[in-house]
Amino acid sequence: MTLLHSLSARAAKRATRWGLAAALLVIAGIAAAGCSQTETPTIDAVLLPPPQVPPREVRAPARVVVKLEAVEKDVEIAPGVTYTTWSFNGTVPGPMIRVRVGDQVEVRLSNAASNTNPHSIDLHAVNGPGGGAGATTVNPGEQKSFTFQAKTPGFYTYHCAAGTVADHITNGMYGGILVEGETRLPVVEREYYVGQSDLYTTGDTGEKGKQSLDYTKLVNEDPTYVVFNGNTKSLIAENALKANVGDHVRIYFTDGGPNLISSFHVIGEIFDKVYQYGSLDASAQINGVQTVLVPPGGASIVEFQVDVPGDYKLVDHALGRAGKGAVGILRVDGAPNPAIFNPLNAGPAAPATATAPAATATPAATAAPAGSTGAAPAAVTIKEDLKDNSFSAPQVTVAAGQKVTFTIANTGLLPHNMHIADAKGSYDGAGNVVSSPEIINPAKTGTLEWTAPTTPGTYKFRCDVHPDQMTGTITVQ
Ligand SMILES: [Cu+2]
């Protein structure tokens, strides 16, 4: 209307020059040109891979085009474990969609001809049959679309509703859509998007190689993996979420399921505000919450300010699931804040990266000095605890030619392993040795047999799950 008014005003000015009849012709021409199209702009939804959140926009209602593609591809869901995921736009969860109340949302779903299954989308933000599933059921090679009006503010799940539905969701076809109200959510320093889902593979947890869907486990609700953002590594090590001390963090959390209710918790934080069930109605907002329940096909928005630096774990507080992958990290950088948190038993202030004292192997009393008699030194056993995320003995000293057995206990909440590089420092080359089992789940133990080379030198080891944080060296004397 604004455009029409201003053009009309200009036309009226011209009327004083050209005469009323000419002005009326100009106005009629504007009306015939279809002014309503210029009133409601068409924009493409910004779609980003998780954990990214589309940018906050303050704008009038628009026609928002959401371009989604069903993707079927093999990905790694845990170290060394591959699985054929089905997804929206190639990520699990699919991209977060951000619209506002009053938008006409046009959802376009295409299914590549190279795919093998029909797919569809049911958005819980829709008022209409199937949430759009019927209107978007596409066979390989097809594209379909529908529009809906975003009516009720909130953060909602979307998912594929083809097949037996549960199989399409567990394979990765779910995501979240935010419908903001007239009043936008306040600006915060950090916004993240996290989805939880449960996977059911033919092999056991951690079993290497290509895995496929186990329908019996699926219907018995006996998951092999419970993960954030599609795999066990999405939010740990170099993929950790980041914030600085003082930041307000908002997490849009959706539970795709298909089966498990999430007890979402951030260890060491209290949610300052929770939008229960993802509702943006004022009545749904509660303050000071430790753990939120998020049902499959549901969502929540949590907000908290971080006061103290360190690593904060994102978990489903049904903590048996941590061993199945449901762990993420929020890494907070900044100055210590002893008024809020002050570890009194830590002794004098130490750098955050201080390592544990070197563990020196204690060989059998009769061990001969290496090289003195030509006899190999006696075998030794060295204990390594895997913590989140460090080795209890990051520096080890052994004799040349010595046989070493590492006994390894995972005392943390995350899966870890121990992997010794070869003489050239390679974790792939000849002579590298990895623990058995290759991935040691929380509360589990493993071993690693290694014979020190006869040449003195330094040998690297690491955890393959946390290669940047969990490292150590073996000095061979
Ligand atoms: Cu599907």
Image (tube, rainbow, N blue to C red):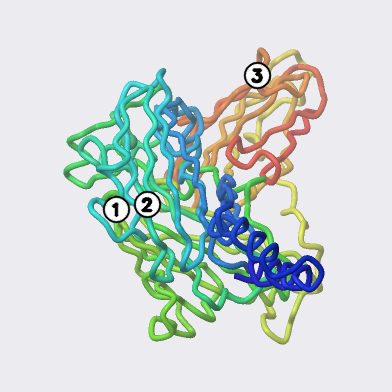
Question: Is tag 3's residue or tag 1's residue first in the polypeptide sequence?
Answer: 1
Give the residue drawn at x 35%, y 65%: 294
Q: Mark 1: which amino acid?
A: Gly
For discs 3 and 1, the disc positioned in front in the rendered view: 1
Disc 2 to disc 3, C-alpha distance: 41 Å
Q: Which quarter holds ligand 1?
A: top left
> Could you tell me if residue 233 is visible in this image?
yes
Question: Is tag 2's residue or tag 1's residue first in the polypeptide sequence?
Answer: 1
Query: With 472 as the anchor, is 54 left or right in this view?
Result: left
Name the quadrant of the C terminus: top right
Seen from the viewer's position, the closer of residues 409 and 165 is 165
Query: With 354 as the anchor, is 2 left or right in this view?
Result: left
User: How busy is the neighbourhood of tag 2: few (under 14 within 10 Å), some, or many (20 plus)?
Assistant: many
Name the quadrant of the N terminus: bottom right
Q: Mark 3: which amino acid?
A: Asp
Query: With 120 as the anchor, is 243 left or right in this view?
Result: right
Q: Are marks 2 and 1 in contact (CB under 8 Å)?
A: yes
The answer to whether residue 150 is above or below residue 340 is above
Pointer 1 residue = 131
For mark 2, give the secondary structure.
strand
Give the residue drawn at x 72%, y 54%: 356
Disc 3 to disc 1, C-alpha distance: 49 Å
Q: Do the residues labelled 2 and 3 touch (CB within 8 Å)?
A: no
Give the residue drawn at x 33%, y 58%: 126
Pointer 3 residue = 428
